[in-house]
């Protein structure tokens, strides 16, 4: 056979093999069946992570809990629904690799119990288990799943070793369930040994939804995180906003991601990294983000010593994140700081100065005036009594409802402005 004929034959065989492989239907559930790169992901939920600092006690290294041979079932209340699902797992603050034995998702029925027949397992690179290296985040393979809008998912993680739960979202305002009886990730009836109200390791849930136009990230401190709201009821002001948006037929379909961290500050480390330190991670890197609402600064006011800051310092920090959002083409709104009776007259003057700049400074694309909505007209540094949780700093359920209902939904029809 001539060299030319051998060449033609080899090319024909290669082309035929490629054609047959492309025509062959994919194996259901096989790794790589759904290329993640071909899907447009939007975050439907994503609690910001912070470190659980060790607390030395006599006779013990620290009080950071560990859960060897345990299953943690965490409840996620979605905003938008979708037809595919993936989870993000973080070991950002861990000091050792985190081994996850298996991860399952199911529709939550009530408490820790799931809907029969709804359970599905995640894979990571086609494998059921995954090791998350120190300081890293891993993303699961895409999973076909009918994700409900404004519904509850139960996401269960089996922890085979004694990894310290140092990466967590401490103020969950949502009960999580722990069973120390091995791998219970697929169990419909989940008998918990103990409970807590935090989210550990689970740092995000993303979906695909052809009708969705993007995500709104609300970043702030405990007043965004929901301190004082009734647990297990989804009554934070971002929850109220999500329900209004997603039940209105005239508004674009957008998720609402709560990136609040209780105790957070604009400029310095408080509970978790500061706003300026975490803005890229918690806002700019959220899948599908189009809009941002910032409610930060009340925890910076009144700090003493080396952490003392002025109103101008807080304004500078807020301006920094506005510029970074605009560089990415995002629309960013400033929310005014709500009343607080717990400060001095000097601190109140700082709050008023920051609020005046938010309202009139022109840096933000618009203003959401939570201060005007919640304050007592008779005493401007005080909540209306109905809106006070009782500690003179955090809103009640009624206060959060008023905040969420005060937001003009047309703000989220706006696209990025030319600059």
Image: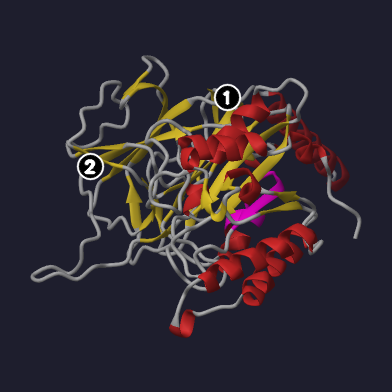
- Left or right for 289, reference 308: right
- Left or right for 376, reference 136: right
Residue linked to disc 1: 149
Q: Which of 122 and 171 is in front in this view?
A: 171
CA gap, disc 1 and disc 2: 30 Å
The percent position of residue 173, horizontal first and vertical second, equals: 39, 41
Q: Quadrant of residue 250?
A: top right
Mark 1 Cα-neighbour bin, 10 Å: few <14, some 14–19, many ≥20:
some
Residue at (58% x, 36% y) in the render: 402
Mark 2, secondary structure of its residue:
strand
Q: Give the range drawn in magenta.
A: 282-295
Residue at (51% x, 48% y) in the render: 383
Residue linked to disc 2: 70
Mark 1, secondary structure of its residue:
loop
The percent position of residue 36, horizontal first and vertical second, equals: 63, 40
Q: Is residue 361 above or below residue 26?
A: below
Q: Is residue 106 above or below residue 311?
A: above
**The magenta stretch spans residue 132:** no
Q: In which quarter of the image is residue 113?
A: top left
Q: Is residue 32 visible?
A: no
**The magenta stretch spans residue 284:** yes
Q: Residue furthest front?
A: 378
The percent position of residue 88, horizontal first and vertical second, equals: 50, 46
Mark 2 Cα-neighbour bin, 10 Å: few <14, some 14–19, many ≥20:
many
Q: How many marks?
A: 2
């Amino acid at each position: 056979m001539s060299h030319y004929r051998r060449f033609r034959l080899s090319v024909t065989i290669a082309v035929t093999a490629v054609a047959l492989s492309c025509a062959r239907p994919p194996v259901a559930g096989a790794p790589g069946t759904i290329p993640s790169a071909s899907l447009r992901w939007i975050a439907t939920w994503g609690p910001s992570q912070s470190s659980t600092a060790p607390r030395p006690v006599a006779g013990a290294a620290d009080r950071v809990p560990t859960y060897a041979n345990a299953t943690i079932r965490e409840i996620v209340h979605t905003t938008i629904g979708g037809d595919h699902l993936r989870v993000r797992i973080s070991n950002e603050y861990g000091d050792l690799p985190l081994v996850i034995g298996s991860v399952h998702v199911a529709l939550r029925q009530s408490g820790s119990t799931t809907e029969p027949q709804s359970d599905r397992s995640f894979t990571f690179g086609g494998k059921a288990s995954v090791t998350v290296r120190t300081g890293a985040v891993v993303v699961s393979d895409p999973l076909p799943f009918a994700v409900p809008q404004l519904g509850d998912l139960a996401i269960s993680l089996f922890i085979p070793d004694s990894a310290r739960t140092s990466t967590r979202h401490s103020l969950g305002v949502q009960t999580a369930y722990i069973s120390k009886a091995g791998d219970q990730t697929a169990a419909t009836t989940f008998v918990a040994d103990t409970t807590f109200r935090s989210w550990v390791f689970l740092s995000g849930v993303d979906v695909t939804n052809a009708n969705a136009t993007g995500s709104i990230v609300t970043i702030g401190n405990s007043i965004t995180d929901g301190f004082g709201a009734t647990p297990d009821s989804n009554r934070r002001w971002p929850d109220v906003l999500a329900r209004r948006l997603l039940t209105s037929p005239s508004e674009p379909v957008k998720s609402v991601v709560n990136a609040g961290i209780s105790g957070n500050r604009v400029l310095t480390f408080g509970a978790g990294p500061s706003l300026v330190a975490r803005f890229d991670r918690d806002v700019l890197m959220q899948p599908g983000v189009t809009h941002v609402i910032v409610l930060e600064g009340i925890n910076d006011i009144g700090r003493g010593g080396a952490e003392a800051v002025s109103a101008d310092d807080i304004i500078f920090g807020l301006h920094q994140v506005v510029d970074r959002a605009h560089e990415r083409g995002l629309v960013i709104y400033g929310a005014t700081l709500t009343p607080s009776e717990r400060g001095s007259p000097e601190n109140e003057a700082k709050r008023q100065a920051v609020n005046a700049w938010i309202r009139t400074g022109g840096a933000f694309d618009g203003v959401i005036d939570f201060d005007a909505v919640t304050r007592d007209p008779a005493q401007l540094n005080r909540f209306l009594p109905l809106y006070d949780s009782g500690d003179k700093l955090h809103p009640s359920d009624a206060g959060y409802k008023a905040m969420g209902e005060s937001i003009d939904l047309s703000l989220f029809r706006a696209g990025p402005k030319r600059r």
